[in-house]
Image (cartoon, rainbow, N blue to C red):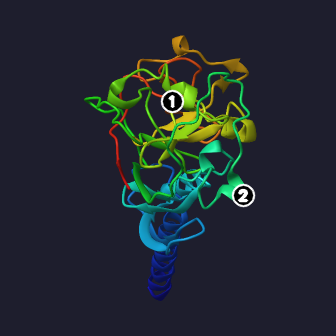
């Protein structure tokens, strides 16, 4: 009888240890799903200015944070709920004739030396901004597509905004392209420097097949080359993108491509639900 009681006691102890070990193992296993409810409190920030922000994020969002930190021109990058917050001053890190007569002229002014013989410097000059991009970290296709607005529709890696395929009043870019500097950007009336087309400084530095930034709906923007092939509009859908795996998203994601023909960056509105930008 005594031996039987002792055996039962040992058996119960073993079961308790096994259950405890299983529980510990499940807590240590990282989540591979973006919908995981497991959270870790962490302080996440990047950039040269701005304070750190403590947020509660999923283990999958840590990877997402690293992707959004590729916006090296940001002054701060962090995750807040279901959004990446990207703060930027919008100053291009390359030279430009539009730095003329600004406080950055000594270091960054460069007369136009591009190939457009119709180039004409517009009267605007680059001004530092205070952009706050709020971009979904788990983008999905919108049930109802929304048109891209005038002004910033996304952010490039150097913190300069992407604009859509139109000049003011939804006019085509036919004449406006003659004001694009040697890196294919220019400032509007308030000094907001931006790209409507391929940011050639970035594709020169990063490669024509590289990640170049994000639109406000959270979907990434890639250059005009993919697997050695130059992408044309006919390779893309009406929003100017398609879906498959990329270097940054090995499990696949919808993404936009920049091409050398209208609409250049984005087509018939956002593929997903846009976040916001304030300035």
Residue 204 in picture, x, y percent from top left: 74, 36
At a point 54% along the width and 50% down the height, the residue shown is: 126
Is label 2 or label 1 in front? 2
At a point 39% along the width and 40% down the height, the residue shown is: 151
Relative to 121, 2 lies left or right: left
Residue 168 in picture, x, y percent from top left: 37, 31
Image height of 110 relative to 59, above or below:
above
Q: What residue does disc 2 label?
A: 107
Kindly identify which numbered label has been placed on residue 191: none
Residue 29 in picture, x, y percent from top left: 54, 61
Crowding at label 2, few (<14), some or many (≥20) Cα neighbours within 10 Å? few
SS at circle 1:
strand
Q: Is residue 122 visible?
A: yes
Q: What residue does disc 1 label?
A: 256
Disc 2 + disc 1, Cβ < 8 Å: no
> Relative to the observer, which residue lies in front, 71 or 98?
98
At a point 64% along the width and 43% down the height, the residue shown is: 97
Q: Real-space Cα distance between discs 2 and 1?
A: 33 Å
Work out which residue is located at the far left of the displayed protein and give it. 144
């Amino acid at each position: 009888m005594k031996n039987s009681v002792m055996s039962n006691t040992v058996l119960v102890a073993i079961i308790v240890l096994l259950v405890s070990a299983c529980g510990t193992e499940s807590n240590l296993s990282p989540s591979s799903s973006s919908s995981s409810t497991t959270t870790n409190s962490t302080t996440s920030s990047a950039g040269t200015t701005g304070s750190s922000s403590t947020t509660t994020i999923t283990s999958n969002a840590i990877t997402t944070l690293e992707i959004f930190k590729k916006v090296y021109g940001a002054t701060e990058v962090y995750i807040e709920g279901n959004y990446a917050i990207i703060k930027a001053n919008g100053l291009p890190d390359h030279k430009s004739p539009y730095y003329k007569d600004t406080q950055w002229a000594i270091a960054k002014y460069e007369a136009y030396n591009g190939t457009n013989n119709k180039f004409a410097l517009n009267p605007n000059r680059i001004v530092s901004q205070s952009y706050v991009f709020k971009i979904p970290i788990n983008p999905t296709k919108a049930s109802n597509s929304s048109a891209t607005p005038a002004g910033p529709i996304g952010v490039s890696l150097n913190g300069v905004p992407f604009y859509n395929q139109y000049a003011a009043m939804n006019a085509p870019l036919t004449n406006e392209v003659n004001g694009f500097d040697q890196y294919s950007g220019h400032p509007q009336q308030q000094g907001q420097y931006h790209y409507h087309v391929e940011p050639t400084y970035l594709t020169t530095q990063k490669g024509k097949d590289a990640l170049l930034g994000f639109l406000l709906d959270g979907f990434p923007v890639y250059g005009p080359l993919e697997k050695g092939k130059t992408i044309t509009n006919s390779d893309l859908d009406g929003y100017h993108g398609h879906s498959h795996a990329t270097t940054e998203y090995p499990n696949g994601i919808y993404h936009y491509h920049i091409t050398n023909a209208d609409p250049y960056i984005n087509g018939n509105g956002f593929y997903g639900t846009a976040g916001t930008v304030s300035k």
